[in-house]
Amino acid sequence: MQRYFTITQLTQEFDITTRTLRFYEAQGLVSPSRRGRQRLYTPGDRTRIKLILRGKRLGFSLNDIREIIEMYASDPGETGQLKLLLDRIAARREELLEKQRDIELTLLELDEVESGARARISELGTRLSAEKV
């Protein structure tokens, strides 16, 4: 197992910018050691970056991600971390389902308006044809 990772290795592996990685460092989410001007990330930092990016893809805020990650190292440890994660997943799922319902209602409304507009165009077209005779 590799002992340290450079910023270049991690930005290439995860397809992120150095600015993103430095931002996570500034937020206290990762804490690389330094050798001169070079940042050296541990396998634990690499795992944290992986978890941060997964959390972002799932729509969690950085505060949610931080709280979930930090719970691993404190009581009640991994069990508490997993329970918190399950709570956040349930909340995120409900939020997305609500958005999905809103989108479905909007699509139905668009269908109604479109149908009405097409019917009116058809009606106007028939009326114009009759008036020309």
Image (tube, helix red, strand yellow):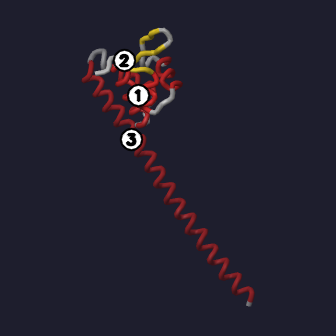
Q: Nearer the viewer, mark 2 or mark 3?
A: 2
- Which residue is tagged 1? 52
Q: Is residue 129 left or right of residue 16?
A: right
Q: Looking at the image, which residue is at 53% across and 24% down?
A: 19
- Marks 2/3: CA–CA distance: 39 Å
Q: Are marks 3 and 1 in contact (CB under 8 Å)?
A: no
- Marks 1/2: CA–CA distance: 19 Å
Depth check: give the residue in front, 75 or 24.
Answer: 24
Q: Name the image quarter holding residue 126.
A: bottom right
Depth check: give the residue in front, 112 or 30.
Answer: 30
Quarter holding the N terminus is top left
Q: Nearer the viewer, mark 1 or mark 2?
A: 2
Which amino acid type is shown beneath numbered disc 2?
Tyr
Give the percent coordinates (x, y) of residue 73.
Answer: 31, 16
- Which residue is tagged 3? 94
User: Tag 3, which secondary structure?
Assistant: helix
Q: Reading the chain from its start, which is encountered first: label 3 or label 1?
A: 1
Which amino acid type is shown beneath numbered disc 3?
Glu
- Residues packed near mark 1 inside 10 Å, few (<14), some (14 to 19) or many (20 plus): many
Give the percent coordinates (x, y) of residue 107.
Answer: 50, 57
